[in-house]
Image (spheres, rainbow, N blue to C red):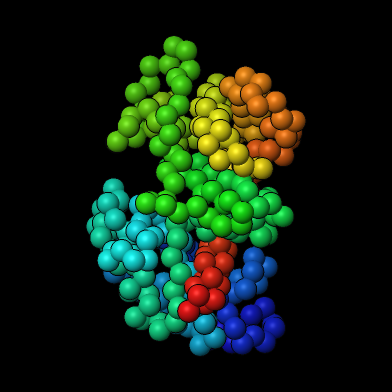
Amino acid sequence: MLEVLYGDPVSRLLGAIELGGTKTVCGIGTDPEHLVRHCFETTDPKATLENAIDFLAGSSDVVAVGIASFGPVELRRAHPDYGHITTTPKEGWSGSDVVGAVSSALGVPVGFDTDVDAAALAEGRWGAAKGLANYVYLTVGTGIGGGAVVQGEVVHGLVHPEMGHVSVTRSPGDDFEGVCPFHGDCLEGMASGPAVAARWGKRPEEVGQDAVLLEAYYLAQGLRNIVYALAPERIVVGGGLAGLPGLFRLIGSELAETLGGYPVLDEHGSDFFVSPAGLGDDAGVVGGLIVAERALGAK
């Protein structure tokens, strides 16, 4: 039982589940500094959700749960498939009723959003976008995905934004086909972890400066789309590839070039406009606490 968190008595804890394609991270707590974590491999839906539920059920003080999930997911509350993962390429997960399983097992309010939307909320409250009302969080790893926050609220529509699938301009002379099974050479197809590995025959952490230069080029192409479509005050970049040496400096110069001086704003050229994630790998699960908090407030 988690009746005491880091030595402090508590009576109101929030639960979080970050469902990832490779691993799942669960948390019980109140904020990044007061969070008990449990991490395990994402397998089939039944085993994965049962593992998460068992962990969260270990505290009688959890009053709400927030789920931050890989996608695509159905976020429209009036839709009959709300709370489901939809047509994901992850084997066995298409059509999984994630919210229903957690809600029926725990009997508390359950919030649901994408992993990148949750991470965006967390970066806005505690991380690199703290104090901003309009910003974007982009994760660059196994896939590329983004969450947009406008006037303090994440953007949902007919579906959640799919920033990893925007079109990018090819680098001159680049004949790499791209790895996206849907579009080939979209941003994810050209700049995700699998794209880097397929292009160079090495894991991303093993590539040299030429690979980092090309990664910065394609990410800047994607960021230009985001700048023009959403006019963010800042773009926060997380995920495994965000740690490539010198990447942020190169993105800054590539973005300035691809914007071509339009619009002429000093902010776009600042050292902070494209920033590394402040919460690192914790952004998703910590964001799940905010999703849980919102579910509690909406009950």
| Residue 98 visible in the picture | yes
Nearer-the-camera pick, 202 or 53? 53
| Residue 37 visible in the picture | no
**Residue appearing at x 32%, y 32% in the figure:** 183
Give the image location of residue 89, x and y in percent: 28, 48
The image quadrant that residue 294 belongs to is bottom right
**Residue appearing at x 53%, y 55% in the figure:** 154
The image quadrant that residue 258 belongs to is top right
The image quadrant that residue 248 belongs to is top right
* 97 is higher (above) or lower (below) than 280: below
Nearer-the-camera pick, 178 or 201? 178
Give the image location of residue 27, x and y in percent: 53, 70
**Residue appearing at x 52%, y 58% in the figure:** 118
* 99 is higher (above) or lower (below) than 251: below
Give the image location of residue 175, x and y in percent: 38, 16
The residue most toward the top is 173
**Left or right: 288 with respect to 160?**
right
**Left or right: 96 with respect to 222?**
left
Nearer-the-camera pick, 260 or 195? 260
Give the image location of residue 94, x and y in percent: 26, 56
* 289 is higher (above) or lower (below) than 127: below
**Residue appearing at x 72%, y 55% in the figure:** 131
Q: In the rendered picture of this protein, how many numbered marks are placed on residues?
A: 0
Nearer-the-camera pick, 141 or 135? 135
